[in-house]
Image (cartoon, helix red, strand yellow):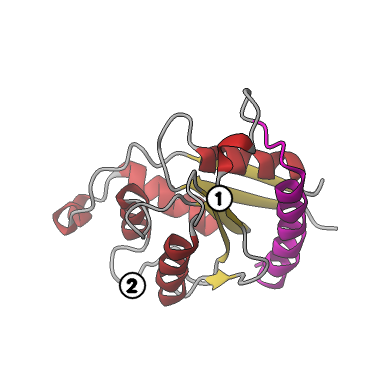
Amino acid sequence: MENLKFIAFAGSIRKESYNRKLLKAAQELAPKNVEIEILDIADLPHFDEDLEKDFPEVAQNLKKRIEQTDGILISTPEYNRSIPGVFKNAIDWSSRPFGKNSWAGKPVYVMGASIGGLSTAIAQSHLKHTLLYLDAHVLGQPELYMGNCTDKFDENGKLIHEGTRDLLEKALQDFVAHAQKFRN
């Protein structure tokens, strides 16, 4: 089985983000041939087309990392029934300048965690819509919406909810198979 290198984004930059914790659980539960690196998007400037002339180095690095990866995991919270602005900003930078969209052809898996009971279904739907427009290869099933997540992690941030662990492990196996179809 081939080794795969994935990158991952938490849609939230909050220090104790449940979505970052979910990605850390993905690192723990990933198949042995998969390495997952969680990237930080906090340092990106606000997207501004005027800055494209002198494309910021941090945005260039983000684009490069997306282009070089075998697959992308995204765990997003839901803010006001959509994705957080900070994550939309990262998508805007990495899909620019026009004609140089780094998401095109990339396998992507979207999931999310929320303290609310409705979880992140609407945010994930918005995000998938955007990613499909950008020509990413979004894995549709299995869906992972982790609501009421405060009691699903222990005091150290480890995912302890067995049902979610099982679903995440299956989702990762399915995503590996999906990503292998598009490997360069």
Is residue 166 located in the magenta-colored stretch of the structure? yes
Q: Name the residue under label 1.
A: 147
Q: Residue 60 at x, y = what percent?
A: 36, 49
Which stretch is magenta? 158-184
Along the viewing direction, whichever of 144 and 95 lies nearer the viewer: 144
Q: In the rendered view, would you say 183 is above or below 12?
A: below
Dot 1: few (<14), some (14–19), or many (≥20) neighbours within 10 Å? some
Q: Is mark 2 on a helix, strand or loop?
A: loop
Residue, far left:
50
Identify which residue is drawn at 32% across, 43% down: 57
Label 2 sits on residue: 99
- Spatial CA span between label 1 and label 2: 37 Å
Amino acid type assigned to the residue bearing label 1 in the image: Gly
**Residue at x 80% of width, y 57% of height:** 2
Question: Which element type, helix, strand or loop, lies under badge 1?
Answer: loop
Q: Residue at x 41, y 76 (%)?
A: 133
How many labels sit on residues? 2
Q: Nearer the viewer, residue 140 or 64?
A: 140
Q: Is the magenta stretch mostly helix, strand or loop?
A: helix
Viewer-closest of 95 and 129: 129
Q: Residue 104: x and y, percent?
A: 48, 71
Residue 177 lies in the magenta-colored region: yes
On the rendered image, what quadrant is the C terminus found in? bottom right
In the image as oriented, which residue stretches furthest toward the front? 117
